[in-house]
Amino acid sequence: MPPAEELFPREFVIDLGEAPKEEAPKKEEEKVEVKKEEKEEAEKITRPIFLHGRKSNIGPTPVRLLEENVKLLRGIDIWADIKNTDVVYIGREGMNLDEADINCGFPLYPNSSKFIEAEKVNMVYVASKTPGQRVYWEGI
């Protein structure tokens, strides 16, 4: 291959020199105003760093995973115990195992898990046709 001087004669090469260095504009700190009511509400919400638990003796009557009103960031992971002998259904208030379609809950088979988007732990209910089932949960 011929040298670069032969491929690109001097009259076609333009020397641009070094590009000027521009400093990035300094960003002003953005101030966010928080309303007094919002601040008070945020201060009321207390949440453990690692929120988790177990619900035992689940039967045909739907029960809350947790009675306390604890706020979640994203939702809740629920795992069915490997020793369960029947399906546990996950649902909301008003779920009924005898009804079809919308109110019957989501089936959670033994040794399986499901993530549920929820604002609070006490919004999630569980039930099973066979008494004595168990689930574990972790709030996220």
Image (spheres, rainbow, N blue to C red):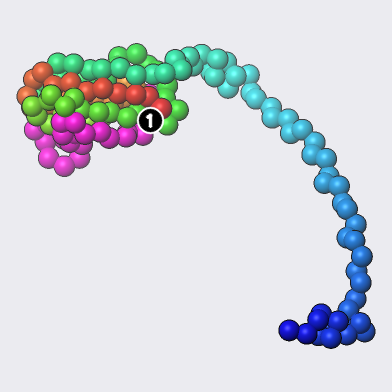
Looking at this view, is 62 or 50 the one in front?
50
* Residue 37: x %, y % from top left: 59, 19
Magenta stretch, residue numbers? 96-120
Q: Is residue 14 left or right of residue 7?
A: right
Q: Secondary structure at mark 1?
A: strand
Looking at this view, is 40 or 25 the one in front?
25
Above or below, comparing residue 122 to residue 16 in the picture = above
Residue in the picture at 86% in, 82% down: 5
Q: Is residue 103 visible?
A: no
Kindly indicate the quadrant of the structure image that contains residue 127.
Answer: top left
* Residue 64: x %, y % from top left: 25, 20
Kindly indicate the quadrant of the structure image that contains residue 110.
Answer: top left
* Residue 75: x %, y % from top left: 38, 30
Above or below, comparing residue 99 to residue 59 in the picture = below
Q: Is residue 46 left or right of residue 129?
A: right
Q: Magenta span has 92?
A: no
Looking at this view, is 114 or 119 the one in front?
114
Task: Inspect the image, locate mark 1, and give the three-letter code of the amino acid beneath it.
Answer: Gly
Q: Which residue is mark 1?
A: 75
Which quarter of the figure is the N terminus placed in?
bottom right
* Residue 71: x %, y % from top left: 42, 21
Residue in the picture at 41% in, 27% down: 140
